[in-house]
């Protein structure tokens, strides 16, 4: 009988502490930790987490599939294992546990039905009951109810009828005997359903504690809202936190203890959304389908409770402010730089599950000139990632997925750029598993391979450097048309309006606008401009206007001077204290309000101006 074995790839250290890749043919027990777990000697192992869950060492699907289906030699596969080990060491994000929150507000139109629900589920749910009709001594009746979705549930704003002010009441008993309908109980519950508003109790109260029309504004924030039968809510908002009584099982299914992994974050230091003006880049907000990307007073934030890790916002972010920390921009570029050079011309990017599926169905095959690389969420890919792979020497990049990653814009942009500059025909493609073997049987040409290191200080700077290097290497100008490349363009500036106040610099966080303070020049770096319009919104003179579309010319600096200013020098001490444009603007504003008595005074710096004012006062 033939016993099948599993080929293990284990990265260890030899007696000289040098990396050593070992291959072993042993069995594997699915559903249990990897056999090398607990040894303390293995740094990294090839494998899939679905087969070996709970393993205490890093598992690399990339190493496993390339070892079994690729054509890398011993040196190349070892280099790949080291690159994967470095990637795992550099992966980090915050992880927290969140306890189950079983609070629910229950709306009812009948007090008996509400009481029955509490008797049935009160032991497992923390119930906040509200009546929307009638009155009952045990429940609050809510009127003028509005429901608003929040990031962690719903918010209820309503009016609560408060006919008796318990702060004023001394329980003197004057009100009870005078009520002809016995609406007022000894517990001070006033049944407004029976009350005919005769006001006898109001007049009898010596402390003005009764107001039959008294109300109190209330607000409740709650994880979930349940509507009992018979409750109709006007203008019910679209949210999955509202349940009907027949959906009680779905409510229970939503209550569980979970671990929140903050794998997607936003760095507001390079985010081009302006909190102050409410303008700027909002591509992440448009991309998110789950309400997880939100505006706050501090800027864009990811609501980790709502985030499902689809990574659409990451792929849409032009600056790299949003990062996917399972494989962030730095990790991706570092891995490309350490991959074995010349080992392959085709790169296959896929999530672990898709690589696992392909590996399972093609064991025993060898795909030459191909490198497989696990990328957890293809939706996190940006144009920068795709161009970086072509610049690393790959003439074909195949994105293996099940059709769930909407990357059409990024793929189309990369293909247009590569077709124009390199002549490569559709080097980037989204493919299904069934198409992949046929494509891999066709040898792909090499990419352009830019050996020099590019700027890795940010996604946009990396992309700008790649585009410049590709244009310079091919000697062809590149036009990024308006519409096809919405995040590229220049700025138009009206020099006669610009006072060089530099207010625009505060809202340009990625260096698209720069100030040359020695030459009193406002400079523009078009390749860094994402056409967000934040600078235009903050300009007090309306001097800046985004101009979509960009042409990149070989061997030429793309930076341009937008405006130049004449320095304003103090007539007394000679110190520069502003620009002539800003001086003239301030003077015109003051003159318009008849606030200028001595025009010459404004040609002095702040210090000398104060001295002249006091000297003038002393002389008088």
Image (cartoon, rainbow, N blue to C red):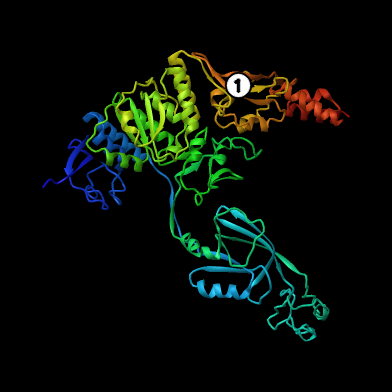
- With 272 as the anchor, is 50 left or right in this view? left
Quadrant of the rendered structure where residue 337 is?
top left
- Residue 327 vs 594, above or below: the answer is below
Percent across and percent down for residue 213 are: 78, 70
- With 448 as the anchor, is 111 left or right in this view? right
Q: 549 or 273, which is in the foreground? A: 549
Percent across and percent down for residue 227 are: 59, 64
Q: 13 or 433, which is in the foreground? A: 433
Q: Is residue 277 visible?
A: yes
Residue at the extreme left of the image, as rendered: 1
Percent across and percent down for residue 345 are: 33, 25
Q: 484 or 204, which is in the foreground? A: 484
- With 427 as the anchor, is 117 left or right in this view? right
Q: Is residue 465 visible?
A: no
Taking the spot 60% from the left edge, 76% from the top edge, the residue there is 112
Q: Circle 1 is placed at which residue position?
A: 523
Residue at the extreme bottom of the image, as rendered: 177
- Residue 66 vs 129, above or below: the answer is above
- Residue 310 vs 230, above or below: the answer is above
């Amino acid at each position: 009988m033939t016993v099948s074995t599993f080929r293990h790839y284990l990265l260890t250290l030899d007696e000289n502490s040098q990396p050593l890749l070992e291959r072993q043919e042993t069995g594997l027990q699915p559903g249990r930790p990897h056999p090398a777990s607990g040894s303390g000697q293995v740094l990294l192992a090839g494998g899939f987490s679905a087969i070996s869950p709970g393993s205490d060492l890093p598992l690399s699907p990339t190493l496993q599939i390339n070892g079994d289906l690729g054509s890398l030699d011993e040196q190349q596969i070892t280099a790949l294992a080291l690159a994967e080990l470095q990637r795992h060491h550099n992966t980090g994000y915050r992880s927290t546990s969140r306890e189950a929150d079983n609070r629910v507000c229950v709306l009812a139109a009948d007090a008996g039905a509400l009481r029955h629900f509490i008797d049935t589920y009160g032991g497992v749910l923390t119930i906040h009951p509200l009546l929307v009709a009638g009155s009952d001594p045990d429940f609050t009746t809510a009127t003028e109810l509005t429901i608003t979705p929040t990031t962690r549930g719903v918010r209820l704003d309503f009016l609560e009828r408060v006919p008796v002010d318990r702060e004023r009441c001394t329980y003197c008993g004057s009100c009870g005997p005078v009520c002809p309908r016995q609406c007022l109980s000894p517990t001070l519950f006033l049944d407004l359903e029976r009350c005919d508003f005769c006001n006898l109790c109001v007049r009898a109260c010596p402390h003005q504690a009764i107001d039959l029309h008294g109300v109190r504004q209330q607000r409740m924030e709650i994880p979930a809202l349940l509507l009992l039968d018979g409750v109709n809510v006007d203008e019910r908002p679209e949210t999955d936190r509202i349940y009907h009584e027949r959906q009680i099982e779905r409510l229970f299914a939503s209550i569980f203890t979970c671990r929140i992994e903050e794998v997607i974050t936003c760095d507001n230091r390079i985010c081009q959304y302006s909190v102050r003006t409410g303008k700027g880049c909002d591509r992440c907000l448009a991309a998110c389908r789950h309400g997880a990307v939100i505006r706050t007073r501090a800027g864009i934030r990811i609501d980790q409770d709502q985030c499902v890790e689809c990574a659409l916002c990451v792929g849409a972010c032009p600056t790299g402010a949003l990062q996917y920390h399972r494989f962030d921009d730095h990790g991706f570029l570092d891995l490309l730089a350490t991959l074995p050079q010349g080992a392959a011309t085709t790169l296959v990017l896929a999530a672990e599950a898709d690589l696992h599926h392909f590996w399972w169905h093609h064991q025993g095959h060898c795909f030459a000139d191909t490198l497989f690389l696990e990328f957890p969420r293809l939706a996190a890919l940006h144009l920068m990632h795709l161009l970086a792979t072509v610049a690393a020497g790959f003439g074909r990049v195949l994105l293996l997925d099940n059709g769930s990653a909407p990357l059409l814009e990024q793929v189309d942009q990369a293909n247009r750029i590569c077709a124009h500059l390199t002549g490569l025909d559709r080097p980037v493609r989204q493919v299904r598993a069934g198409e992949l073997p046929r494509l891999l049987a066709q040898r792909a040409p090499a990419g352009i391979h830019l050996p020099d290191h590019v700027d890795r200080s940010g996604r946009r700077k990396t992309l700008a450097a790649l585009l410049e290097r590709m244009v310079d290497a091919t000697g062809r100008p590149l036009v990024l048309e308006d519409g096809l490349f919405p995040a590229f363009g220049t700025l138009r500036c009206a020099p006669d309006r610009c006072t060089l106040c530099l207010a625009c610099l505060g809202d340009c966080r990625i260096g698209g606008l720069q100030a040359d303070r020695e030459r009193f020049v406002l400079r523009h770096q078009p390749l860094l401009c994402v056409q967000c319009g934040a600078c235009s919104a903050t300009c007090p003179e309306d001097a800046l206007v985004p101009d979509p579309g960009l042409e990149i010319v070989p061997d030429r600096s793309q930076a341009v001077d937008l405006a130049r200013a004449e320095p304003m020098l103090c007539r007394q001490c000679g110190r520069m204290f502003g620009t002539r444009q800003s001086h003239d603007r301030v003077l015109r504003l003051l003159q318009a309000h008849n606030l200028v008595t001595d025009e010459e005074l404004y040609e002095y710096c702040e210090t000398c101006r104060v001295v002249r004012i006091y000297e003038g006062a002393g002389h008088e």
